[in-house]
Amino acid sequence: MAHQPGCALHRRLHASLDAADLPAVAAVRRRLRAALEHWGVAPELADTAELLASELVTNALVHTGRGAVFDAVLTEASRLRVEVQDGAAQAPARRAAAAETATSGRGLMLVEALADDWGVQLRADGKTTWFELSAA
């Protein structure tokens, strides 16, 4: 049976990332952007999703010292859910940037400000940090 590009089976993106593989962050952004374009998501939503996904993946790779698993799903209800799993069992901490020109320290504040919903699910083998955006 052939599947249409808009069907649920084609609205999922999955990637596994190795520890400290920061070049993989750019690859995840490119793959997410391509998937969102294919799914017909508005460019403004794609921009926000790409930014927030980049923040979560970078946080997982930089602050845990472990790899990560990235998943993005566009639901039937036109909600984009992005999850990043890592093997560290401690919740991420929101922190302020060290200085106005600092290049880090704003990731979770961006997620909190731009996502429709977000959170952290602690598990025995680590955690999943996620956000959702309405694509409707």
Image (spheres, grey):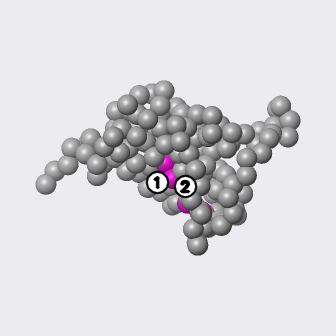
Q: Is residue 51 left or right of residue 74?
A: right
Q: Residue at x 67, y 44 (%)?
A: 108
The majority secondary structure of the magenta stretch comes to strand
Magenta stretch, residue numbers: 82-86
Work out which residue is located at the far right of the displayed protein and give it: 99
Residue at the spot 58% in from the left edge and 72% down from the top edge:
125
User: Residues under labels 1 and 2: Cα distance?
Assistant: 6 Å
**Disc 1 marks which amino acid?**
Asp
Q: Are marks 1 and 2 in contact (CB under 8 Å)?
A: yes
Q: Which residue in the protein does label 1 denote?
A: 71
- Say which label, 1 or 2, has the lower sequence index: 1
Residue 31 in view (yes/no): no
State the residue in front, 79 or 98.
79
Quadrant occupied by the C terminus: top left
Identify the residue at horizontal 61%, vertical 40% (top origin): 111
Location of residue 32 in the rendering, given as x and y in whole percent from the top left corner: 46, 43
Q: Would you name the residue on which mark 2 appears?
A: 84
